[in-house]
Image: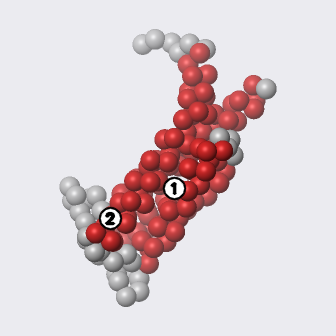
Amino acid sequence: MNKPTSDEPAAWITFFQIYGAYLAFPVALTAMLGSLYYSEVVGYLPCKLCWIQRILMYPLTIITLVGILKDDEYLPTYVLPFSVLGMCISTYHYLLQMKVITTNSCGDLTCSSIEVSYLGFITIPFMALTAFIMITVIMSLTQWAYAQMEEEE
């Protein structure tokens, strides 16, 4: 196995400084369009937890786009609260669906019902959780990259 050279960390730092927002934007956009597809085209009604996840995901599309346009180094600071909270809500929702956690009701629509199931475990909250995790990891690495740049200065 080759030893890492001193240029490799600098390459990762530069990569996430430049492309972090560009990586997070399509994830947020795909999640937003996917949720709209399932509700507006397929006709699935979102439950309360789905609405909360939408409330947390939809702004990320706009925030990351504005961050790209303004080349904002503080973008992770704006994105991470939404994505981390979204991870928590999506995890809870997925655990409800998988019957790990039980609840009496989630309103008119039950949050434990499964409308979509690919491969037996990929449900809509699982897809949202995956998107929130991806955005959180990307933005955390981007924030790390900017912090490394500040330390070098």
Say if residue 123 shows up in the picture: yes
Residue on which disc 1 sits: 61
Viewer-side residue, 97 vs 9: 9
Where 148 falls versus 93 (above or below)?
above
Viewer-side residue, 42 vs 90: 42
Residue on which disc 2 sits: 37
Element under disc 1? helix
Which quadrant of the structure image shows residue 94?
bottom left
The dot on residue 42 is none
Name which of mark 1 and mark 2 comes first in the sequence: 2
What's the CA distance linking mark 1 and mark 2? Answer: 16 Å
Viewer-side residue, 42 vs 9: 42
Residue 81, given in percent of the width and then of the height, sits at: 61, 58
Judge from the rendering whether residue 78 lies leftward or rightward of residue 101; answer left or right: right
**What residue is shown at x 28% (from left), y 74% (from top)?**
43
Element under disc 2? helix
Residue 19, given in percent of the width and then of the height, sits at: 54, 35
Amino acid bearing label 1 = Thr
Q: How is the image coloured?
A: secondary structure
